Amino acid sequence: MNRNSSRYMKNKLPDYDTVSAVLYARVSSKEQEREGYSIPSQLKLLREYAAKENIKITEEYVDIETAKRSGRVNFEKMVHYLRRHKRVKALLVEKTDRLYRNLKDWVTIDELDIEIHFAKEGTVLAQDSRSSEKFMHGIKVLMAKNYIDNLSEETRKGMIEKAEQGVWPSFAPLGYLNVAGENGKRIIETDPVLGPMITCLFEWYCTGRYSLRQVSEKARQAGLIFRKSGKPVPTSSIHKILRNRLYTGVFEWRGKLYKGSHELLIPFVLWERVQGVLDGRNASKIRGSSYNFAFTGLVTCGHCGCAMVAEIKKKKYIYYHCSGYKGKCDEPYTREEVLEEHFTALLKQLRFDDEVFEWIRKALKDSCSDKVRAQTESYKNLEKERGRLQRRLDEMYIDKLDGKVTEKFYNRMHIKWSEEKERCFRDMELYNEADESYMEDGIELLRLAKDAHVLFEKQPPEEKSKMLDFILSNCSWKNGKLYAEFKQPFDLLAETVANDIQSKKAGIQNSDRFEKWLPEQDSNLRQID
């Protein structure tokens, strides 16, 4: 049993009584079924975990999302059940991305005040878990949902370095594939199937005889599809492809052009001719470029709850005001610079010095070390089980040769034990996927939060909007004041910074200031078999 589970049993079950819990399993596509995320495998893992941890499963909820049926009906039923049955204080799930699809799900579960057991990750998360555990859990949620993307120059340094070396630094567009280069770094090379189709797209459209819709239809007939989903490429994506100069061997990254080291699919002359056709057809539709307002869609009016919208005065001053959708509102117009100052002041609440950074970084590493130790033990157990199953298969084969078992019995048991052995192997591979990436992302997120106010001031409007949407929620403006909440796990950092300021004023020593982040020191903590 892992350390978190031991702590849970010690704190919550001093008499080792059975605790009640609900079980939740989910798959979101047939692809996941094929990759081992099947509902039966999840149910088996969670039931075995419950038996081992002395947990009584009161209800089981399963969601299967397909192309024809989206949404999580049983997730909502589970939440409703937990709200009505307060004595059920635990939830069992395979791992983080099986439970959450978005930050809203995270907040919903967090409000239930229950303990969450992530069986495959070897983690038990509760309201009294130390801050480092909650923070790392937040990192996992954010990583699982791909929310950290293009946030600041600091987080893009590695990508810029790749671009300067002529390597496309992101996911390969249609027509190319991401592969490992000679030095182990990811590069792109031509997709032997889709690459020629991309070339045909440009050749068809440059003639001027086809509209975007007609070219899209020709592409569908030729078999141009998305690699992962297998779905036809829509007209909007065809337009983006025709605008992408990456196919000429030159690409744009962060406003600069770079000479790529990848194979070009079309000559630059052909790309220019296509741009001419596109621009010529859109000329009548051009109405002037729209301005990207930094805070549109982020702030609501604190008086009536309507959206704050922006407009330009005298062709250079940007003002925000209530949309007045619900009627006339008394909130006066506000300059964009004023809103920006308030957002900067809010982000400064995340600012902490190098001493605090080192304490939190150490706590995160200690937290990951606990998990690594627990996973190492689980890996050894899986290795033993796999060896035991292999010995069974070998012995049964000899028994079949000696006539001690029938052919029918041998075939049935061979299938069963081989499947169990394969499951052990898959689980071992998952444990081999260490939490190093989460650890690195966690530290990178700390650096981002530490310098958020500085980075924010340097970003263009579009990036300001992305950054605020990533860090803050429920932003409203009322009577010249900005009200907002930090999203998880940034709320933990803001609380830590505020507490540290108060602790310094009170003369509290370092070891006590970060007590919530550090591992618990309990001499009575013992392992439970």
Image: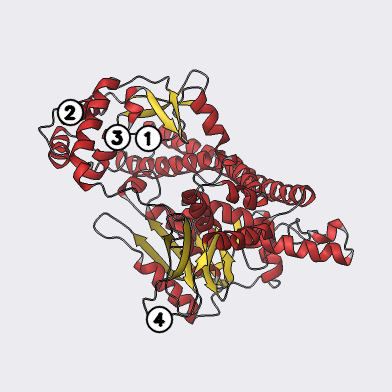
The alpha-carbon separation of the residues under discs 4 and 2 comes to 52 Å
Q: Mark 4: which secondary structure? A: loop
Q: Amino acid at mark 4?
A: Lys
Q: Which residue is mark 2?
A: 206
Crowd around label 4: few <14 · some 14–19 · many ≥20 (10 Å): few
Task: Give the x, y percent position of residue 412.
Answer: 33, 44
Q: How many marks?
A: 4
User: Is 225 displayed left or right of 88 in the figure?
Assistant: left
Residue type at tag 3: Arg
Left or right of 132? Residue 138 is left
* x and y, in percent, of residue 71 in the image: 33, 63
Q: Quadrant of the C terminus?
A: bottom right
Q: Nearer the viewer, mark 4 or mark 2?
A: 4
* Residue drawn 78% across the image and 58% down it: 514
Mark 1 or mark 4, which has the lower sequence index?
4
* Residue at the spot of label 4: 328
Q: Which mark is residue 243?
A: 3
Q: Disc 1 versus disc 4: distance between alpha carbons? A: 86 Å
According to the image, what is the colour scheme of the structure? secondary structure
Badge 3: residue crowd in 10 Å (few <14, some 14–19, many ≥20): some
Q: Pick whichever of labels 3 and 2 is earlier in the sequence.
A: 2
Residue to which mark 1 is pinned: 400
Tell me the CA gap for discs 3 and 2. Answer: 12 Å
Q: Please give the label number shown on residue 421.
A: none
Front: mark 2 or 1: 2
Disc 1 marks a residue whose amino acid type is Lys
